[in-house]
Image (cartoon, helix red, strand yellow):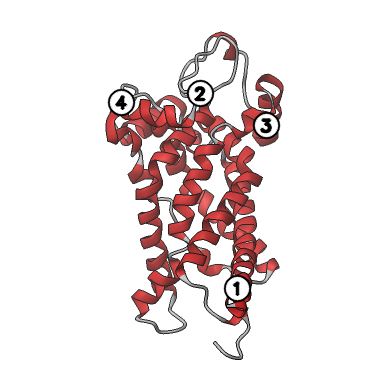
């Protein structure tokens, strides 16, 4: 378009999809230890611990991280990273990369859609992303829950081996385990974010706190159910009922602090990276077009 800067031209779908997935991977690299700490706290107290893991107890987000580093080494904080990055390339590419196009579809190309349309577009891309990326989430959570201690048996030795083993022992249902509970907390509030960095920060942590308060019970059940062997729970509802009867209502908020910190910081890093990557890709594209 003559007379327009690269930043004024709407990025094509491919640029949005690729930059969203890449930005999400960057955010995961920064915040993954918080996510791992969240998982360890969420599953703590679920069943009796024996052997080398018997004396280990996690207390708070930083206590959990320091305990993992001391007992398992710093690499344990990134257990499941490969599956986590696979998840972001599948999940964020769809959830965020397709968001503008789906929003335009619902508004039939009109500008300034209302909040209802934005929520509908976010829920649509979120549900689609969860349906595609669920197997990667199952593998990620199981690796994060897996302790790297001598004398403690390991369920999986590698990411691809984990996919194969889950499929062989649990079938496709095992790979998509907990998909309904994963869809529930998918609250797509990216329409709240602007290009202004303070707005990125305030919106991410403000909306992140509200989201964590509402979705934490579902997230804890989801984590435990996805991590569980086939015979442990009859269903996700049975998992929730078992938590309530054995550990009480406070169990539904285990891992609240790392969950909140991770959600807020992840979204700040992700959306800042997303905007910068889109701009860089559009500028590169303009340079290439100018030389051809």
Q: Nearer the viewer, mark 3 or mark 4?
A: 4
Report the Cα–Cα distance between label 1 and label 3: 46 Å
Q: Nearer the viewer, mark 3 or mark 2?
A: 3
Report the Cα–Cα distance between label 2 and label 1: 57 Å
Q: Earlier along the polypeptide chain: callout 3 or callout 4?
A: 3
Is label 1 in a helix, a strand or a loop? Answer: helix
- Determine which residue is flagged by label 1: 288
- Could you tell me residue 195's position as x and y percent? 63, 71
In the drawing, what numbered circle is on residue 38? none
**Foreground pick, 134 / 44:** 134
Residue 116 visible in the snapshot: no
Q: Residue at x 47, y 82 (%)?
A: 112
- Determine which residue is flagged by label 4: 168
Q: Look at the image and tell me in which quarter the N terminus lies.
A: bottom right
Report the Cα–Cα distance between label 3 and label 2: 17 Å
Q: Which residue is drawn at 53% across and 26% down?
A: 44
**Foreground pick, 83 / 33:** 83
In the drawing, what numbered circle is on residue 45? 2
Q: Measured along the vertical axis of the image, is residue 82 above or below residue 291?
A: above
**Foreground pick, 292 / 39:** 292
| Mark count | 4
Quadrant location of residue 227? top left
Q: Earlier along the polypeptide chain: callout 1 or callout 3?
A: 3
């Amino acid at each position: 378009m003559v007379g327009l800067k690269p930043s004024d031209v709407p990025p094509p779908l491919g640029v949005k999809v690729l930059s969203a997935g890449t930005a999400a991977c960057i955010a995961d690299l920064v915040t993954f230890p918080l996510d791992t700490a969240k998982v360890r706290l969420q599953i703590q107290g679920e069943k009796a611990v024996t052997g080398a893991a018997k004396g280990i107890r996690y207390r708070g987000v930083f206590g959990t991280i320091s305990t993992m580093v001391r007992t398992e080494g710093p690499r344990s904080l990134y257990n499941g990273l490969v599956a986590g990055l696979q998840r972001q390339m599948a999940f964020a590419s769809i959830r965020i990369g397709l968001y503008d196009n789906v929003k335009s579809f619902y508004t039939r190309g009109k500008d300034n859609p209302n909040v209802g349309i934005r929520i509908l577009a976010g829920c649509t891309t979120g549900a689609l992303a969860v349906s595609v990326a669920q197997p990667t989430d199952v593998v990620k959570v199981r690796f994060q829950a897996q302790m790297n201690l001598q004398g403690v048996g390991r369920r999986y030795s590698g990411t691809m081996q984990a996919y194969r083993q889950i499929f062989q022992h649990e079938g496709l249902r095992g790979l998509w385990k907990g998909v309904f509970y994963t869809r529930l907390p998918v609250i797509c509030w990216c329409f709240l974010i602007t290009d202004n960095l303070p707005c990125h920060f305030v919106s991410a942590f403000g909306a992140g706190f509200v989201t964590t308060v509402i979705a934490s019970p579902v997230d804890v059940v989801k984590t435990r159910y996805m991590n569980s062997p086939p015979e442990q729970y009859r269903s996700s509802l049975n998992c929730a009922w078992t938590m309530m009867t054995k550990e009480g209502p406070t169990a539904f908020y285990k891992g609240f602090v790392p969950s909140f910190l991770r959600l807020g910081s992840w979204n700040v890093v992700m959306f800042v990276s997303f905007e910068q990557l889109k701009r860089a890709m559009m500028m590169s594209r303009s340079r290439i077009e100018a030389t051809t």
